[in-house]
Amino acid sequence: MATRAGRAETAPSAANIFNPNNSTGATTVMNESSPDDLRAKGWMVAAHNDYRLGGKRMTFWLLTHANGYWIKGEGETDAEALNQARQSDAIGLCAEYDATINASDFGQ
């Protein structure tokens, strides 16, 4: 077991999925419990809270994008909440927005 930033890392588990959507075309492992894939698409974490609801542990994630869209997810685990956020239609809208901005930056 390796450590990074004071946390123990283990081999990929059920909370890790394969991410075919990367620029190299190679398959990489994405941790469903981390918003890193969303950050790579321009999303910023605005709020992340852990709380109890009726005695049950819950987590909440709110992410915003530079174009004004926001996505959120709630669940019993970070993976569940972030996967809920990943299902938002705003993800695709922001990708289109980013493509338009990037094309105009290069005069296309």
Image (cartoon, grey):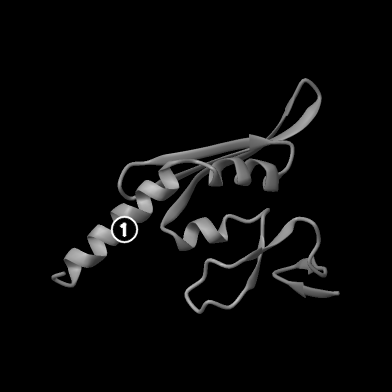
- Residue 40: give x, y in percent of width and height: 47, 63
Residue 5: image quadrant is bottom right
Q: Amino acid at mark 1?
A: Asp
Nearer to me, 67 or 92: 92
For the C terminus, give its image quadrant. bottom left
Query: Residue drawn at (69%, 48%), measured in percent from left and top?
Result: 79
- Residue 18: give x, y in percent of width and height: 67, 65
Element marked by disc 1: helix
Residue 37: image quadrant is bottom right
- Residue 98: give x, y in percent of width and height: 31, 58
Looking at the image, is 4 positioned above or below residue 69? below
Query: Residue drawn at (57%, 55%), measured in percent from left and top?
Result: 35
Looking at the image, is 28 positioned above or below residue 72? below
Q: Residue furthest right?
A: 1
Residue 29: image quadrant is bottom right
Q: How many marks?
A: 1
Query: Residue drawn at (63%, 56%), measured in percent from left and top?
Result: 34
Read off the residue under disc 1: 98
Q: Residue furthest left?
A: 107
- Residue 11: give x, y in percent of width and height: 82, 70
For the N terminus, give its image quadrant. bottom right
Q: Residue furthest top?
A: 54
Lateral position of residue 101 relative to residue 87, left or right: left
Query: Residue drawn at (37%, 55%), measured in percent from left and top?
Result: 95
Looking at the image, is 59 positioned above or below residue 79? above
Number of residues whose C-alpha sits closer than 10 Å to that of mark 1, classed few (under 14), some (14–19) or many (20 or more): some
